[in-house]
Amino acid sequence: MSFDTLLSSELIDRYTRAGYWGDRVITDYLDEWASRTPDKVAFVDSRRQVTFAELKQLSDRCALGLLELGVGPGDVVSFQVPNWIEWIVLHYAVSRIGAINNPLIPVYREREVGFMVGLAKSKVLVIPDSFRGFDYPAMYGGLDLPSVEHTLVIGDSSGGSWDEFMATPWEERRDPASLADYRPDPNEVTLLIFTSGTTDEPKGVMHTHNTMLAATAPLPERLGITGDTVFHMASTLAHLTGFLYGARLSVVNGGTCVLQDVWSNERFVELVAEHHITYTSAATPFLHDFISAPNLAVHDVASLTRFCCMGAPIPRAIVREAREKIPGLVVVGGWGQSDDALVTLGVPGDPDEKVIDTDGYPWPGMEIRTVDLEGAPVSAARAGHRHARGSRRRSARSRSGGGAARRNHPH
């Protein structure tokens, strides 16, 4: 499949000179931390954990295996996998060889995945044998997907399974040093992610290595993230929130990330206490669930100091209750979309009216305006269509306003 974008040499030069885009890709960070802190835990899921050294070894093996299966730069690998370490391994392997990640949300069914995988012309598909009682191989067995040459099933004990694939010492068949030859250009497409949007068919959004790294680069300074930060992600990694701030943010900063595959507020409380989680990003209802958990009072959750709420307004009562129950917790709001990741985000120390009534400040590298139906700028007191462009996208597209006018026009 050809991935034509609106990316031009002028845009590359503009955002490179401005410092938003550089010459790094996500696997550069993995290599760095695997060398500097090889024994540090990189990811924890509901079944196991891996160190940075183990993650590099597993993802490199996977990358070599994908090459042996005929996957190369520009080929699409689709994976409908829960928040498991297998998802992480696959993502870094696909990125390593310049192929294109196409993560699919686990709740998607025949109509969605048939369209998405068909449009992407995916060469390899990775799915679980079962998750939350659903039979994924049976679903895909009923679909006509002629581009898919290999399907790897996690948890399947029969031939051709993911476990068999990963148990194969591909590094003995292909020189691991050859992976360096596949390092992609940071301005090449690395992600094809689908969003339902407002049309009948899902829209495929393309991102480059640089646009994805630009979406995480300002977070350490704005939110106080360091290598000691312990991250958490319960949103699906196949959503851009999970993709950026679950699968990648911790690796960029050398921290540990705890993955939660099935949401339970009681389990989240336990995870915070067990792993001393300090940071999470999620939709606002997750915050309400957290502070309403019946076991909150019997666990020490004081380590959690950052909760980034996205996707819905933050009611004043929830902010007040969160501060009363966890005095050190800072709640900030943000807004974004699959097309351009974060567009706005608050900062610690914002007064309540900023947290409640706005979506924060424009993200570095993003330009924002709100216009009326004729395209004329409108004031902060009026609702309108929001336009956004910048270092995380190749073109501007209008988004209709709704709800509170001030929330539609970030300060």
Image (tube, rainbow, N blue to C red):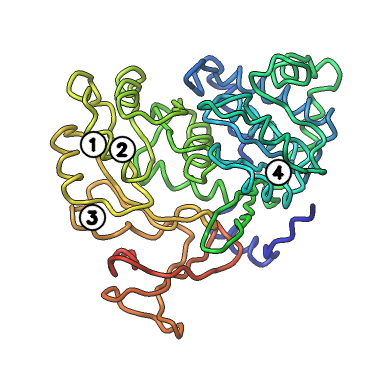
Q: Amino acid at mark 3?
A: Ile
Q: Give the secondary structure at mark 1.
A: loop
Q: Between residues 84 and 177, which one lies in front from this camera angle?
A: 84
* CB within 8 Å, label 1 to label 3: no
Q: Quadrant of residue 295?
A: top left
Q: Position of residue 8 (x, y in %)?
A: 69, 65
- Vertical side of 410 occupied by 41: above or below: above
Disc 2 and disc 4: Cα gap in Å?
A: 31 Å
Residue position marked by numbered label 2 in the rendering: 306
Q: Which mark is residue 329?
A: 1
Can you tell which of label 2 and label 4 is closer to the viewer? 4
Pinpoint residue 24: horizontal percent, then vertical percent: 63, 42
What residue is shown with label 3?
356
What residue do we see at 77% from left, 33% from top? 180
Amino acid at dot 2: Arg
Residues under numbered marks 1 and 2 in contact, where contact means CB atoms less than 8 Å apart: yes
Which tag, 4 or 1, sits closer to the chain's start?
4
In the image, what residue type sits under mark 1? Answer: Leu
Q: In the structure shown, which secondary structural element does the residue marked by tag 4 occupy?
A: strand
Compared to residue 38, the image places residue 77 above or below, namely below
* Mark 2 surroundings within 10 Å by alpha-carbon count, few (fewer than 14), some (14 through 19), many (20 or more): many
